[in-house]
Image (spheres, grey):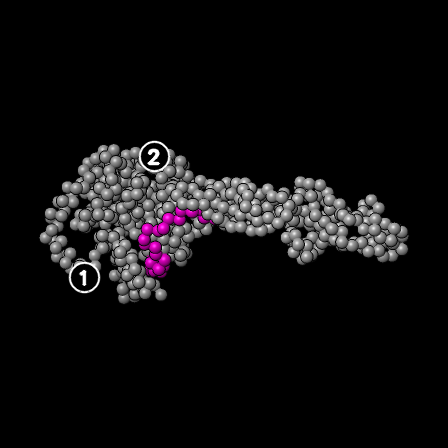
Amino acid sequence: MRRRPRRTAVCGAAAALVAVVGGLLPVTTVSTASAASSASSASSASSASSASSVSSAPSASSAASIRSASAGSLYGAGPYRSPTSEAAKAATALAASDPAGADAATTIALYPVATWLGEWTQGTQLTKTIATAVTGAEQSGTTPVFVLYAIPDRDCGGYSAGGFSEASYDAWVDQVTAALAGHRAAVVVEPDSLAMLSNAKCSTTLDEQRYRILSRTVAGLTAAGVPAYLDAGNSNWVPPATMAARLNSAGVQQARGFFTNVANYYPTAQEQAYAQKVSAATGGSHYVIDTSRNGQGWRGTWCNGPGAGLGTSPRVVSDGTALDALLWVKTPGASDGTCNGAPAAGKWWSAYAQALVANARLGVPAADLTPRGALEVVAGTGGGVRVRGWAFDEDDPTQPVTVRATVDGTAAGAVTASLRRTDVDRASGAGATHGFDVVVPAAAGARRVCVTAVNIGAGSDSPLGCSTVRAYRHDPYLALESAKAATRAVSVRGWAFDGDAVAAASRVAITVDGKRVTSLDAGRKRADVDATWGSGTRHGFAGTVRVAAGKHTVCAIAHNAGSGADRKSSPCRTVRVR
């Protein structure tokens, strides 16, 4: 399953984690001590409980009723936790051979994870898988979440390649829909199916087939009273407007809405900012966010990202936005594919599961409401001070942050942080257009420059830093420090630099009695010049010129670079040559 392609001592940690986050465990989790009691009462109450749950489940519905229902009414007591999840199976399988891995799997198994359905579940196995989850959920008043993952040309030849033919897929979906009709459930329909259309490996003819198949799928689920969510990629894959257009073509108006961040790592706040834009462009569609592995944020790669951690535990959300729930759609611990030393896609990877548990952040993350950024360069230049860095706001990473600068406490200008910075994208996953590099006007001299990133949405502005540097005029700076007479020659020494090009060696002309006799490069090491002017150490010049005997006036002229004009040394030097 691809994430961002573009068309162009864990044993102890796991035990400690369970103890620490006990208050965050979903309502479907029961303790070992209470399990027997729950089991004994379940059999006597199962008929009544099941009947009650079925009667409260959505009936055959219109799209309007599905889209307007509250998240609470759709999810009941929350997402369903299966006692036979992949994590639970791994815990049993690893108990003897890999105790640390078994502990990690046991921790993951404490939380609700979606049930994935694909070509590996067909016929009676498909019916049994759905019935088992539905029955278990109805006994606890929770809602099973299923993932359909068998669309034709799935993953366009990637690690998770596969899927049915179109006719077989339609028949398979009909079986799923029939099994879910009359029961409380939610369906995540085909991760990557729409975002992947941006990938060069997907044929351009695939688009219309995807739209056709997905429209039929969600229409059928809605008619059966089952809320369905279509693929919306993630916040750093497809622009909101483009994704909204694809969703509309795929029938999102006949579905509950869409999902984001499946099997990815982007922070929840960043995903929600993106999803709200997509929602607004699709008639207020609701959405869910996969938080299964985003506890540590973007990890630099979509495939088995190193250093990832479990994210916020699954829960229904009522925050006044279009967000329905935070779900664990991706099975934490299941490999993304054979990258970074992992097994094949979908196979349990014990080492990775242990790392996810060790790095977990299961509670609701504190919102990072202030912009993030860095002030990397503050350097004097001709006419002002150059400031360079990056900034973005997770409230809306698609909108460039305004960066303001002050000089000696007085406002000196503002610029949008929109320059391309692929390194920022690799590190944060917030996109590649968050850089700034600008010259802030300032009079020549030592100046205190401060830079602030302006907040977007909730939160406050974020100071990026201050620095004291020397601003320069546009004309060159120079000094002819000495001119010493020798036999029929004069030796000269001095320094020069141009504020518009402090990194370069200035060219200096030497004149004798007003006539140019030679040119020198001011590139010799002069630490004293840097100590005084902050211009760098390579600005010294020295040389010898041949002259006739007699009294002479020797001057130096620094050639200008950029704005400004050439500059003549003051004073010049008078020498008598023998």
Query: Which residue is at 30% across, 40% downward?
Result: 320
Secondary structure of the residue carrying numbered label 2: loop
Query: Which residue is at 34% across, 34% downward?
Result: 282
Q: Position of residue 239 (x, y in %)?
A: 41, 39
The residues tagged by marks 1 and 2 sit, at their Cα atoms, a distance apart of: 47 Å
Q: Position of residue 573 (x, y in %)?
A: 81, 51
Q: Residues within 10 Å of mark 1 (few under 14, many from 20)?
A: few
| Quadrant into which the C terminus falls | bottom right
Q: Is residue 418 toward the left or the right of residue 312 in the image? A: right
Query: Which residue is at 11% across, 51% downward?
Result: 45
Q: What segment is highlighted magenta in the picture?
A: 349-373
Q: Which mark is residue 282?
A: 2
Q: Which mark is residue 293?
A: none
Q: Position of residue 160 (x, y in %)?
A: 35, 48
Q: Is residue 334 visible in the rendered structure shown here?
A: no
Closer-to-camera residue (444/105): 444
- Amino acid type, callout 1: Ala
Closer-to-camera residue (409/95): 409
- Amino acid type, callout 2: Thr
Query: Which residue is at 13% across, 44% downward?
Result: 52
Residue identified by numbered label 1: 33
Asked if the stretch drawn in magenta spans residue 300, the answer is no
Q: Is residue 144 toward the left or the right of residue 206 in the image? A: left
Secondary structure of the residue carrying numbered label 1: helix
Q: Seen from this angle, which residue lies furthest front?
A: 409
Closer-to-camera residue (155/430): 430
Q: Position of residue 409 (x, y in %)?
A: 54, 46
